[in-house]
Image: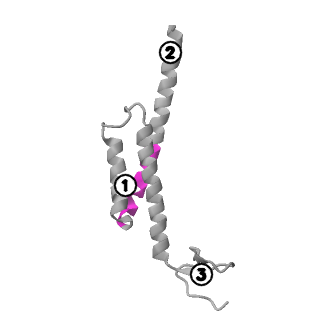
């Protein structure tokens, strides 16, 4: 291959490496934002949070570090788990249920939670 072909391959590889690094950093920032919720997430949430961060920071990875796909996968998985856990905890804490038009039980909308029932 010519020198020009190698230059194109190196530039494209650099662009892919930078794009995956940016994606991993964005996911890490989102996971870090959930840190303030750790008190209400219990032991499972703490393990997912700290496990994802430790895996991302440690130099030992499944894939070599110029390829951040494994880090992004771990961070995305932790973020999905933590988000689901937050929603479950908030729904359980609200605990208020009302009957919808079809008679099915639904959580009260946030604007109605904590209010006394009206006589309507």
Q: Write the residue at 37% across / 49% down.
A: 52
Q: Main secondary structure of the magenta part?
A: helix
Which residue carries the number 2 mark?
A: 7
Magenta-drawn segment? 25-39
Q: Write the residue at 52% across / 81% down.
A: 114
Label 2 vs label 3, nearer the camera: 3
Quadrant occupied by the C terminus: bottom right
Q: Earlier in the sequence, mark 2 or mark 3?
A: 2
Q: Write the residue at 59% across / 74% down.
A: 109
Q: Which mark is residue 48?
A: 1
Quarter of the rendering containing residue 72: top left
Q: Tags 2 and 3 in contact by the CB under 8 Å rule?
A: no
User: From mark 3 to mark 1, how far is it between C-alphas?
Assistant: 33 Å
Query: Where's residue 64, x and y in %?
Result: 37, 31
Tell me how the rendering is colored.
one colour
Which residue carries the number 3 mark?
A: 98
What is the secondary structure assignment of the residue under circle 2? helix
Where is 48 relative to 112, above or below?
above
Quarter of the rendering containing residue 82: bottom left
User: From mark 2 to mark 1, how far is it between C-alphas?
Assistant: 41 Å
């Amino acid at each position: 291959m010519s020198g020009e072909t190698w230059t194109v391959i190196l530039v494209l590889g650099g662009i892919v490496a930078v794009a995956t690094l940016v994606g991993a950093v964005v996911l890490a920032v989102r996971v870090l934002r959930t840190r303030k919720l750790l008190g209400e997430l219990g032991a499972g949430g703490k393990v997912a949070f700290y496990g994802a961060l430790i895996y991302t920071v440690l130099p030992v990875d499944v894939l070599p570090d110029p390829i951040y796909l494994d880090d992004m996968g771990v961070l995305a998985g932790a973020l999905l788990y933590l988000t689901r856990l937050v929603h479950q905890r908030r729904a359980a804490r609200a605990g208020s249920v009302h009957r919808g038009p079809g008679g099915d039980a639904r959580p009260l909308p946030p604007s109605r939670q904590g209010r006394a029932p009206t006589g309507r």
